[in-house]
């Protein structure tokens, strides 16, 4: 039970760790993807929008300066009015672009650059207004001179500032792209690492579970085998004599019952030989119980060796044995069997270096002549054995001697 609890606890911890890995994998993927989305949004929506506004402002400023230059070159008043309208529209685009750029939000560095551009735009407007005033006063030569020496150079300075700002946003875009790539790679490798760890843990849990299951199965098989051995031993102990290994009284009565049923059904006969060793108590008292047990074991072997495979030999208890003879035709058959048993038991045997002389009395009964059931037959055989044991020497069977 403690091993099973430890196994369940280990599996539980492993599954909790696996779930934690999966949750960590999911959370990491979501966070990394959210960061990646934010970085791409900055690149696509914020920086690109600023770049577009700067480009719009730069183009509008160029159109404004170009319109002013065309006004200075035009001699026709109507043509000047057309260029002047284009000049004003370009100025509106410059202002709206810078306003939109400011509304997007600027970093401190970007704000300083934006303030410098504001001062430069004020200077540009001042110079451009002088050019327009000179043109309105019909001083085209002076206007062109101011345009060439003041307006165009200051416009180029403004254009370079816009280009520098646009390049800065381009660099910021590239940096954001690199960060997004790094975030993607980090998310990929972390996801891969978490996934491999989760798979490895799952495989480890599966391997450990299979191993534990096999061990448990083997333990169960071993326990079942031990249980079967114990059951066989219990069955053997319940039906056999522990000293001689012969059938005990219970098993013998069951076999006798089956033999009587078979003989009753098919019209046969069943014989019983009741064997009782004479003066066996004297052997135990004189030589000890270990010699007595050896005598009983040897008697069991000889009874078994001189009977047929279809016959049954049992020890009823103490020094009493019984032989079941199936398929006998009459008294001549079991008398012949009794004589064979007497010859087998009459052989010489030495136990622990001692010559022991033993005699046996054999009584017999036959079904259905002496009884129609087990108890009647056993009583008849027992009574016959006592008649032999108590008769004179001419009526008794031969003594059994173990030399």
Image: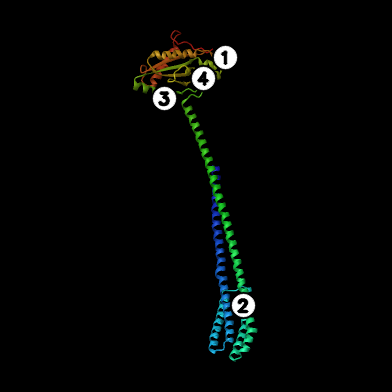
Q: Residue furthest bottom?
A: 137
Q: Which residue lies under the disc numbered 1?
A: 354
Place residue 43 in its image quadrant: bottom right
Q: Residues within 10 Å of mark 3 (few under 14, many from 20)?
A: few
**Location of residue 336 in the rendering, given as x and y in whole percent from the top left corner:** 42, 13
Q: Which residue is at 58% across, 62% downward? A: 181
Residue of label 4? 297
Query: Label 3, label 1: how many angstroms apart (C-alpha)?
Result: 38 Å
Residue 366, x across and y down, in percent = 38, 17
Which callout, 2 or 1, points to the residue nearer the camera? 2
Residue 56 visible:
yes
Residue appearing at x 59%, y 68% in the figure? 173
The secondary element bearing badge 4 is classed as helix
Marks 2/1: CA–CA distance: 136 Å
Residue at label 3?
Answer: 254
Q: Earlier in the sequence, mark 2 or mark 3?
A: 2
User: Looking at the image, which is closer to me, 306 or 202?
Assistant: 202
Q: Secondary structure at mark 2?
A: helix
Q: Compared with residue 373, is residue 396 higher up or lower down, i.e. above or below?
A: above
């Amino acid at each position: 039970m403690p091993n099973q609890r430890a196994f369940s606890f280990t599996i539980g911890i492993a599954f909790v760790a696996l779930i934690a890995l999966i949750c960590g994998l999911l959370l990491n993927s979501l966070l990394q993807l959210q960061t990646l989305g934010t970085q791409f949004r900055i690149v696509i929506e914020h920086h690109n929008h600023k770049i577009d506004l700067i480009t719009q402002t730069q183009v509008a400023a160029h159109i404004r300066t170009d319109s002013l230059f065309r006004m200075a070159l035009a001699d026709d008043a109507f043509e000047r009015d057309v260029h002047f309208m284009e000049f004003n529209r370009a100025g509106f685009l410059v202002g709206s672009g810078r306003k939109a750029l400011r509304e997007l939000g600027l970093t401190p560095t970007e704000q300083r650059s934006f303030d410098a551009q504001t001062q430069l735009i004020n200077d540009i407007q001042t110079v451009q207004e002088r050019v327009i005033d000179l043109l309105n006063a019909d001083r085209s030569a002076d206007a062109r001179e101011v345009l060439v020496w003041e307006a165009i150079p200051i416009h180029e300075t403004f254009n370079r500032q816009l280009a520098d700002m646009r390049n800065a946003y381009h660099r910021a875009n590239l940096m954001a792209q690199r960060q997004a790539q790094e975030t993607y790679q980090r998310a990929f490798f972390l996801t891969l690492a978490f996934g491999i760890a989760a798979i490895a843990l799952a495989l480890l849990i599966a391997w450990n579970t299979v191993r534990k299951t096999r061990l448990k199965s083997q333990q169960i098989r071993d326990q079942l085998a031990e249980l079967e051995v114990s059951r066989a031993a219990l069955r053997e102990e319940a039906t056999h004599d522990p000293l001689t290994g012969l059938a005990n009284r219970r098993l013998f009565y069951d076999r006798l019952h089956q033999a009587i049923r078979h003989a009753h059904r098919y019209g046969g006969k069943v014989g019983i030989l009741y064997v009782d060793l004479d003066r066996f108590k004297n052997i135990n008292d004189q030589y000890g119980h270990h010699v007595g047990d050896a005598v009983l074991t040897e008697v069991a072997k000889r009874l078994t060796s001189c009977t047929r495979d279809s016959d049954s030999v049992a020890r009823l208890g103490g020094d009493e044995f019984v032989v079941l003879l199936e398929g006998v035709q009459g008294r001549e058959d079991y008398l012949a069997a009794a004589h064979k048993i007497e010859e087998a038991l009459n052989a010489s045997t030495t136990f622990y270096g001692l010559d022991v002389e033993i005699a046996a009395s054999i009584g017999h009964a036959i079904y259905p002549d002496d009884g129609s059931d087990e108890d009647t037959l056993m009583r008849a055989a027992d009574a016959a054995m006592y008649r032999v044991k108590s008769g004179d020497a001419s009526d008794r069977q031969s003594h059994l001697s173990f030399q």
